[in-house]
Image (tube, rainbow, N blue to C red):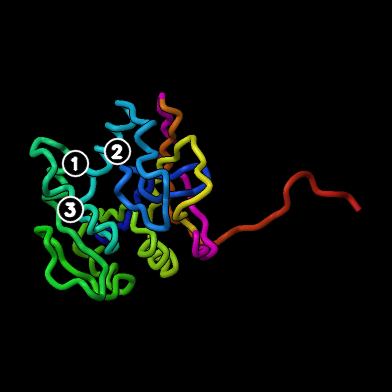
Amino acid sequence: MTGELVVDLFLTLDQVMQAPGGPDEDPSGGFPFGGWQAAFQDAEGGADIVAQVRSMDALLLGRRTYDIFAGYWPKAPADDPVAIHLNGVPKYVASRTLGEPTWAGTTVLREPALEVAALKERHREIHLIGSGDLLQTLLAADVVDVLNLWLYPVTLGTGRRVFEGGAIPASFTLDAAPAGYASGAVHLRYRRAGDVVTGRMGPEIER
């Protein structure tokens, strides 16, 4: 059975995805709001995120996000459930320049859009986390199966956005019941469904 590529994204209402986890995560472009997700932490939402991490059996990252993760998760507390899982699963990083990866269990992909099909034959559930440039490449190649979105009640007005480079026309279906948390955040899971369908809104006008 062919596996699937799931994209995990933590987003503001204005679709900013940059540096949700900490001030030093990604200050590129002078981004001043690193760590914006921290204000919305709650136990239920945290448990949901951990459950999603544990569902993956492979991790796919762009080079920028890989460097951030590789610098943090191998050094995280040994009993951290997210660290345990991320350090243990096979990891793939898209890069044309990276030589020998430092994070154990990492394979370098030179042509990720072309190599995802082979990864789906090898793994049940591959997760892409963050990795905005790689996400654009994979969306354009139409190889993303699921958009797994955590949407937070804040706008930033600046920062790297999900569909900054545009998107191919595509429709999605809701793949699970939406979950809302005490923080005001919501979790939405959408599955790729086919082409865009158009129509007319409201009652037909008699002529």
Label for residue 64? Answer: none
Dot 2 or dot 1: first in sequence order is 2
The residue range painted magenta reads: 164-182
Q: Amino acid at mark 1?
A: Val
Q: Seen from this angle, which residue lies furthest top?
A: 182
Choose between 144 and 129: the one closer to the eye.
129
User: Which SS type dominates the magenta stretch?
Assistant: loop
User: SS for tag 3?
Assistant: helix
Q: Report the Cα–Cα distance between label 2 and label 3.
A: 21 Å
| Residue identified by numbered label 2 | 49
Is residue 75 shown left or right of residue 41?
left
User: SS for tag 2?
Assistant: helix
The quarter of the picture where residue 145 lies is bottom left
Query: In the rendered structure, does residue 180 fall within the stretch colored magenta?
Result: yes
Label for residue 71? Answer: 3
- Is residue 110 depicted above or below 181 in this figure? below
Query: In the rendered structure, does residue 128 fall within the stretch colored magenta?
Result: no
Q: Amino acid at mark 3?
A: Gly
Coordinates of residue 38 in the picture (x, y in percent): 34, 34
Coordinates of residue 64 in the picture (x, y in percent): 29, 61
Mark 2–mark 1 contact, CB under 8 Å?
Answer: yes
Give the crowd class for mark 3: few <14, some 14-19, many >=20 residues within 10 Å. Answer: few
Dot 3 or dot 1: first in sequence order is 3
Q: Amino acid at mark 2?
A: Ile
Q: Seen from this angle, which residue lies furthest right?
A: 207
Choose between 54 and 33: the one closer to the eye.
33
Q: Report the Cα–Cα distance between label 2 and label 1.
A: 9 Å
Give the crowd class for mark 2: few <14, some 14-19, many >=20 residues within 10 Å. Answer: some
| Residue identified by numbered label 1 | 82
